[in-house]
Image (cartoon, rainbow, N blue to C red):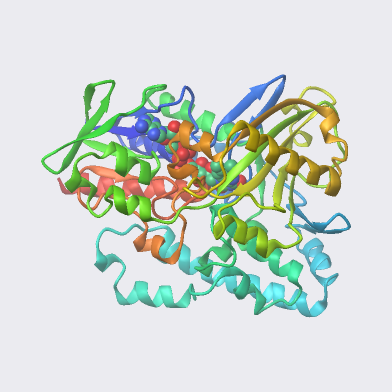
Amino acid sequence: MKRVIVIGAGVAGLAAAIRLQHAGYEVELYEKEPRVGGKMNQIQGGGYTFDVGPTIVMMPSLYREVFELAGRDPDDYIPMEKIEPMLEISFSPEDRLALSNDLSELTAAVEAVSEEDAQGYFEYLATLYKRYLIAKNSFLQRSFRGPADFYNPKSLAAGFRLHTLGDAYSSVSKYVRDDRLRKALAFQTLYIGISPYEGPSLYMIIPMIELLYGVWFIKGGMYTMADVLGRLFTELGGTLHLSEPVERIAVRGGRARGVVVGDEVREADYVVCDADFPYAVKNLVQDGRARGKYTPEKVDAMDYSCSCFILYLGLDKRYPQSAVHSIRFAADFKKNIADLFDEARFPEDPSFYLYAPSELDPSLAPEGCQTLYVLVPVPPISETSPSWTPDATARYRERVLDLIERETSYRDIRDHIAFEKAYTPVDFSERFNAYNGATFGLRPTLMQSNYYRPHNKAADCESLYFCGSSTHPGAGVPIVLMSAKLAVEELMRDDRAN
Ligand SMILES: Cc1cc2nc3c(=O)[nH]c(=O)nc-3n(C[C@H](O)[C@H](O)[C@H](O)COP(=O)(O)OP(=O)(O)OC[C@H]3O[C@@H](n4cnc5c(N)ncnc54)[C@H](O)[C@@H]3O)c2cc1C
């Protein structure tokens, strides 16, 4: 039986490990942290339970696929319910827009703006659906090895039909006039760490995916997914090593031969790496030839997604809620985005996202209490980005709590914080080796997307494969699940040929 070592038990590493174990390989998974999940992690304290990173479940069929492949019923592992309303957006305390998956509710909400804009809104969704099918079939579900995989008439024609030049906000502006509706259809590019005012506009398909396929909640929170993937992997006979960081990938004769853990080489026929690609190629691949074009200088010069400052608040009371997921837009959203992507500073007036899941799952907080997850997009770590000293972090916390008290229904939140923890870009960098603390990996600019994103099979080293946010097809749980599938397909294709 051939041996595979997987580095990193993030959701992509776990999914890759399960796929390989199921396909008959002997798989060992090495994770530096004491528990599985990577950014899909969990914080517990004072009777409160929080998801660390991802909270919005989109494209549930991709979550379910890993269990189905292994012959399991996903409902036994990740019971899901659809969230309604899907999202509430506030542009000011008095100006809110609830987005629903229910077609008649959604129609009422957009018609309340104007019938003309409602028409444009639905036309735009139809356009996005067409582009989504092109992207899915031509780019997202296939990997690239060499130029011929991309520079061929079929792919180039598909790329042309995607109309990927331009940015999400300009693209929606051709269909709807109301600035609030425009923002409501453009801001989702932030889910993968790129500005809605920056191309490529391919990523404008995200709001369509939310609206057409729904937003879901997994009982116990997102961490349930990581936890049960870890369980499934060991049920299938895989070996999980926790708190065992890989120091480097052992390369000899142009081929990955295993990994080095604690000064010891652990041999394998193939290595799949889920540790963040820029970190991994710079630190774990020490053989210059195996790195290929990804030299340390190139890695440093690449563009990185935004990061996140998150407050995890355990509240000793329950506030009335109209939505599980809500977003507060900065009054000057364009400036907020410029602060993040151009000025590299903590936004003066930040937009933020609130997630309050204990309404759906009371087991996440003590009786009569609730959790609140507050996420503020911030710049990744760079020479000019905000410092995250305790003093600076405390100041940002105050600014965010001021806004929450002033503009949301959590008017006296400071009096009711019974448990608190914060994550900054430094935590994402130190705990999970997210390069520059960029929570969504390499920024999916035109020149860092599709064929131009790091491939799932290493170009200059045999038997080495990559998955995860910074590789093709990109960031977000469903998308990194695809990257795991593509990396495994590449490995098995090579194995069949050997
Ligand atoms: C705050 C936040 C909010 C998000 N919200 C959403 C959302 O709502 N919906 C959504 O779909 N996506 C969301 N995302 C994105 C999503 O979480 C990620 O794209 C996904 O979890 C990445 O998984 P991964 O397996 O690629 O990487 P990771 O989770 O980073 O996994 C990499 C693993 O490798 C380990 N590792 C690193 N170096 C080593 C080493 N040397 N040896 C051994 N192990 C190592 C790390 O510890 C980690 O466990 C969010 C992300 C963040 C941070």
How far across and down, in percent of the image, does residue 272 sit? Answer: 31, 39
Which residue: 74% across, 43% down?
399
Count of marks, rendered view: 0
Seen as rendered, the residue at the extreme left is 253
Image: 281 above or below 26: below
How far across and down, in percent of the image, does residue 175 sit? Answer: 67, 78
Task: Write down the quadrant of residue 245 in the picture.
Answer: top left
Image: 47 above or below 384: above
Task: Write down the quadrant of residue 147 in the picture.
Answer: bottom left
Screen quadrant of the N terminus = top left
Which residue: 57% across, 61% down?
195
How far across and down, in percent of the image, does residue 325 sit? Answer: 73, 47
Instruction: Give the side of residue 256 with respect to residue 384, left or right.
Output: left
Instruction: Give the side of residue 82 with respect to residue 146, left or right.
Output: right
Instruction: Give the side of residue 104 with respect to residue 252, left or right.
Output: right
Nearest to the observer: residue 166 or residue 225: 166
Nearest to the observer: residue 312 or residue 18: 312
Nearest to the observer: residue 257 or residue 138: 257
Which residue: 64% across, 60% down?
187
Task: Write down the quadrant of residue 330 in the picture.
Answer: bottom right
Which residue: 68% across, 41% down?
396
Nearest to the observer: residue 68 or residue 243: 243
How far across and down, in percent of the image, does residue 197 sit? Answer: 59, 67
Residue 63 visible to an observer of this rendering: no
Image: 225 above or below 459: above
Residue 175 visible to an observer of this rendering: yes
Screen quadrant of the C terminus = top left
